[in-house]
Amino acid sequence: MPTYAYRCTACGTEFDIYQRFDEDALTECPTCGAALRKLFSPTGIVFKGSGFYRTDSRAAKGSSGATGKESSGAASKRPSSGGKASPAAKAS
């Protein structure tokens, strides 16, 4: 269950309360009865696994990395039919 922080607009009382997502926000200060404001703060995020650091998406120094030469050479490495016609071509 999430914890929400509230602050009274009149007396400045601050408190945290556990509320379900489907519950309505509190509107009345329990101390003085004035209006409450919901406080928002940044959350802590922990990234786990690869791909979250600047160095994860780069090639290591000294390695051959992805270059234009590799991508253009991939076309020449495709298996060829060796000049032989396919069985379907022979039948027609």
Image (cartoon, grey):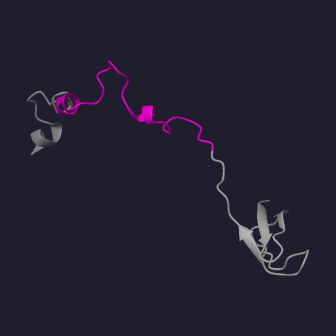
* Residue at the front extreme, as displayed: 11
Residue 32 percent across, percent down from the top left = 90, 78
The answer to which of 19 and 5 lies nearer the viewer is: 5
Residue 79 at least partly seen: no
Closer to the camera in the image, 4 or 37? 37
**Residue 31 part of the magenta segment:** no
User: What residue appears at the point 38 percent right and 23 percent down from the top-left corner?
Assistant: 60
Counting from the top left corner in percent of width and height, residue 37 is at 74, 74
Q: In this view, does 28 lie above or below 18?
A: below
Give how far across and how far down residue 77 sits, in percent. Answer: 19, 27
Q: Is residue 50 left or right of residue 61?
A: right
Residue under the image location 10 percent in, 30 percent down = 84
Residue 30 placement (x, y as % from top left):
90, 75
Magenta range is 46-73
Say left or right for 53 vs 63. Answer: right
Residue furthest to the top in view is 62
The quadrant of the rendering that contains the N terminus is bottom right
At horizontal 78% and vertical 68% (from top left) the residue drawn is 6
Side (left or right) of 73 relative to 38:
left
Seen in the picture, residue 74 relative to 22 is either above or below; the reply is above
54 in the magenta segment: yes
Relative horizontal placement of residue 69, taking residue 50 as reference (left or right): left
